[in-house]
Every structure is written in C-alpha cells, then in structure tokens.
Amino acid sequence: MSEGPTRAAGRGALAAAGCYLAWGLFPIYWKQLGQVGATELIAHRHVWSLGFVLIVMAAGGGFSDLAAAVRSRTALQWHALSGVLLTVNWLVYVWGVNHGRVLETSLGYFLVPLINVALGRFVLHERLRPVQWAAIGLAVAGVVLLLVGVGRLPWIALTLAVTFGAYGLLRKKSPLGPLVGLGLETLLLFPFALAFLVWQQSTGQAALGRLGAKEHVMLVSAGVVTAIPLLLFAYGARRIRLATLGLLQYIAPTVQFVLGVWVYHEPFSRERAAAFVFIWTGLALYTADNLRSQRRLTPA
C-alpha cells in the first residue's frame, strides 16, 4: 500500500531533519578521532562509503544504473568533479573541527544558501530579487567584518560554502539519482583513497593497528556514518517542498554553533558575534523571501 501525500511529507520531513541533525552532531564524532590526520580520515570515509553504498545497491538492485553511469563519459566527468569538490569540503571540515574551528565550520554552512543564490546569478544567470541582493550584501558585510575585526580571512568557512554550493550545483545538473551519484563519486575516488591508505600503512604512519578498539570501530564506520545521512537526505528531498528543505538545512550549522560555543568553548568575540548577526540577518531575509515566493507559486 502506497503512503498518502501527508504521511509521505511527514516522513520526508523527519528524514531530512534527522539528516541535518546528524550533520550538526558530526564534530563530536570526528573529535573522537582527533589523533588521526584529516586526509587519512577522509580516505577511510571514501573506502568504507563505497562498501556501504554497494551493499545498499545490492539490496535494491541498483548495479545496472551504476554500470550505465560508468559507461557514460558525461556522467564520469560531472561526478569526478563533484566528487573532488565533496572531498575538499569534507577534508577542510574535518581539519577545522579537529583544530578547534567548529564555529567557523558552522559559519560556512550558514553561508551555503546565500552562496547558492550567488551561483544562480553568476553561473546560471538567474535574475535576483532586490531582497536576495540585500541578503548577499549582508553576508559579504559579515565576511568583511571577520576580515577586519578578527584580522584574517575566514578561509575555512568560505571554502566549505563555495565547495558545497558548487557540489550542489553539479548534482542539480546531473541526471543520476542520489544513490547512484554517490556510488559513482566514491567509485571514482576509491583508487586514490585506497592507494593513500596502503602507502600510509607501508610507511608505518597509518592509524590502523595503533589505535584503541573504540577508535578502530569508529574509523571503519566512518563511511557508514557519513553515507546514512546522505540517504536520509535523498529520501526526504523527494517527499517535501523545497522551501521546507531550505528551512530544515539550518539545523546542522545551528547545532555546530551550539557545540562550538557551549560545549567546546571556542572564543566568540564581539567582532565575530557582529559578523554572525549580519549573516543571520541575510539568511532571515533570504528565507522570508523564499517562503513568500513559494506561497505565490503554490496553487490554492
């Protein structure tokens, strides 16, 4: 029996919220593996993610779609690039978390919706409404405040926002579904990740074999832990409105912000607070404008 639209939307919202909550709590997971380098962590993530995705595909019969994608030159080009962008995003994110920069990682993901608007204007040549221009201007002002007040460019936040925004743009253009796209990305990057791990092991620098039992389990589970939220996201995105998904996405950076300030006690100066206020105001304008636009497009 198929689920009704109301029940489907409810389950979709729960799945998307669970995905963003998991992403928000990830700093707790990665900090448990702080003694492992970020590059090695991401290599393990690629290797074990591929294993998990292939198991899911075996259960759902998705190998034929993956095989067709491998034979498509266009799919290979798009997903090789999107895979590299996602790898850079995760590498910078894990490095930032494990170097006491959780607040800056949260800032990066707060910036993503506004980066998406900017990419729509300058890459897809979409027309922006005045409120959207104002939202982008406030975000730029927040970044400038950090540069002037804190004395350095928030490169972690900007890298996370740009790479994830560009990744979303490429996935939007891809004809592949979420699971097949993720499978192709991890498959393309698997040889490089495996080669790096083998090299680490041969030089005696690898984490495997020198960590405790708990850390070994967490390291091997990194792929599963990071792949499950992506599948929840795919399930939710198909069942709820884009406006609802846009509101739920703020769960992740908000949880990261709370962790950075109240759990890990990272410094939160007046200059940084002022920058966050500018960016949050821009997000509020963007969200309100998006909701109003959605209401106009929705038939009575």
Image (cartoon, rainbow, N blue to C red):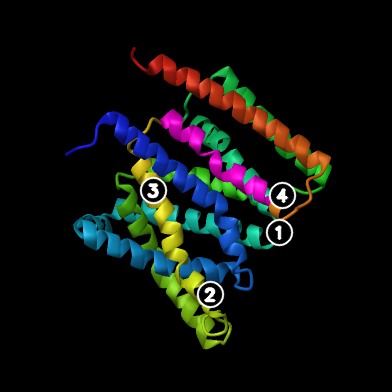
| The quarter of the displayed image where residue 275 is located | top right
Quick check: marks 1 and 4 in contact, CB under 8 Å? no
Q: Where 184 sits versus 220, above or below?
A: above
Picture coordinates of residue 36 (x, y %)? 60, 73
Coordinates of residue 248 in the picture (x, y in percent): 49, 37
The CA span between labels 1 and 3 is 28 Å
Q: Can residue 279 be spotted in the picture?
A: yes
Discs 1, 3 touching: Cβ within 8 Å: no
What SS does tag 3 mark? helix
Q: Amino acid at mark 3?
A: Leu
Compared with 73, 133 (above or below) is above
Element marked by disc 4:
helix
As drawn, the label of residue 262 is 4
Q: Which of the two discs, 1 and 3, labels the residue nearer the N terminus?
A: 1
Q: Label 2 amino acid?
A: Lys
Q: Residue at x 36, y 35 (%)?
A: 10
The Cα–Cα distance between marks 1 and 2, rounded to whole angstroms, is 22 Å
